[in-house]
Image (tube, coloured by chain):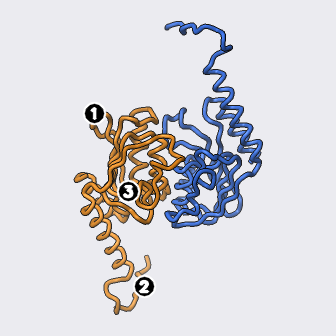
Chain colours: A orange, B blue
Amino acid sequence: MERLLRRAALVGEAGEIPVAAVVLNERGQAIGWGSNRRETDQQPLAHAELVALQQAARLRQDWRFNGCTLLVTLEPCPMCAGALVQARMGRVVFGAADPKRGALGGCLNLASDPSAHHHMQVTGGVLAERCSTQLEAWFRRRRQQRRGPSPGTPAVPAPAG
Amino acid sequence: MERLLRRAALVGEAGEIPVAAVVLNERGQAIGWGSNRRETDQQPLAHAELVALQQAARLRQDWRFNGCTLLVTLEPCPMCAGALVQARMGRVVFGAADPKRGALGGCLNLASDPSAHHHMQVTGGVLAERCSTQLEAWFRRRRQQRRGPSPGTPAVPAPAG
C-alpha cells in the first residue's frame, strides 16, 4: 500500500485523481499495475483497478482471478467492484473508504449483493488515513487552482499562442 | 436492435454468450460496436458494452457521452451499468431483462442508486422476446453439448495427440 501511495502521488501530479492499484497472484507476485488515467487517455474505463486487471489478464491469458488479490488506495466504484466480481477476484484490499460512491460497503455493497455470482473476501481501511489525506489534499489543491491565486485577484485571460 | 441480434448470433457461434452493443452519437451515427469477447480475449472486461464504449471513447477522444445512446441486447451487469454511469451515457436501451444479474432494474438499479452521480435515461424491453429467445437457445445448446450426444451414451475419453 506504501508503494501504491507513491504511485498515486505521481498520477496526482499529472492531473488525475490519485488512485493506484495492483493485482497480486497466488504467490504474492505483482502481475498488473494500474493508476487512474481517465483524463490522460480520455477513457471512461481507465480507473486504476481496471487498468491493473486488464494488464494482469493479458499476462495470465485468463479472465479468472480466484486465488489473486487486488490492492487499491480507494474503495472501488460500482464499475470497478462489478469488474472484480466478474473477474472472480479472490480478495480485495482497499485504503480509504468512499461513503459517496464506494461499492464495497461505503455506499452499496456489490460483493454481497444478490447479483454477485462470486463472493470475494474484502478488507477495507488499510493505511486509510494516509490514503484519505492524499485524496483530500489533491482535491483541495485542485479547488485552489480553479479559484485562482487568491479570491480578490481579478481574472486575467491566458495569453494566446 | 435487429442488427445487434445478428451480430450477437455470430459471437454465439464462436462460443461466446451472444450479446452485442453499439454506441450512437448525438446524430444517431454508430461510433462504437462491441460484442462479448470474454472467452476469445480471456479478458474479464470484454463484455459487449465495454468493448463498444472503449472504441467510441477512442474515436471521440472524450470520456463523456452525455448526448449519446448505448443499445445492447441484454440488460447490463453491475460492471457495465457502473461503466455507463462513469461514462455519463445519455441514454441506455436494452433488449432482454436479466432478473439475476441485471443492474438497470432487473436485480438492482445502478442508474437510480445513491452512488450514481449521473442520471441516465433507461429503456428496457426493446425486442425483448427475440433477445431472450436467442440467449435461451444458446444456453440450451451449450448444455446439450456439455452433456454429450445422448444421456445413455457412455463417456469415451478423447484420443490423445
Residue situated in front as seen by the camera: A65 or A113: A113
Left or right: residue A67 versus residue A42 is left
Name the residue type under label 3.
Glu
Query: Who comes first in sequence, dot 1 or dot 3?
Result: 1
What residue is rendered at 49% in x and 34% in y?
B42
Query: Who comes first in sequence, dot 1 or dot 2?
Result: 1
What residue is rendered at 29% in x and 56% in y?
A125
Q: Name the element at disc 2.
A: loop
- The residue labelled by disc 3 is A75
**Badges 2 and 3: C-beta atoms under 8 Å apart?**
no
Can you tell which of label 2 and label 3 is closer to the viewer? 3
Density class for disc 2 (Cα within 10 Å; few <14, some 14-19, many ≥20) is few
| Position of residue B56 measured from the top left corner of the image (x, y, whole percent) | 58, 54
Quadrant, the C terminus of chain A: bottom left
| Position of residue A38 measured from the top left corner of the image (x, y, whole percent) | 44, 58
Density class for disc 1 (Cα within 10 Å; few <14, some 14-19, many ≥20) is few
Output the chain of dot 2: A
What residue is rendered at 62% in x and 41% in y?
B35
Relative vertical location of residue B159 with respect to residue A114 in this rendering, above or below: above
Task: State the CA–CA distance, disc 2 to disc 3.
Answer: 39 Å
Relative vertical location of residue A129 with respect to residue B139 in this rendering, above or below: below
Q: Is residue B87 visible?
A: yes
Residue situated in front as seen by the camera: B27 or B125: B125
Q: Name the element at disc 3.
A: loop
Output the chain of dot 3: A
Mark number, residue A157: 2
Name the residue type under label 1.
Arg
Task: State the CA–CA distance, disc 1 to disc 2.
Answer: 55 Å
Name the residue type under label 2.
Pro
Left or right: residue B129 versus residue A38 is right
- The residue labelled by disc 1 is A27
Task: State the CA–CA distance, disc 1 to disc 3.
Answer: 24 Å
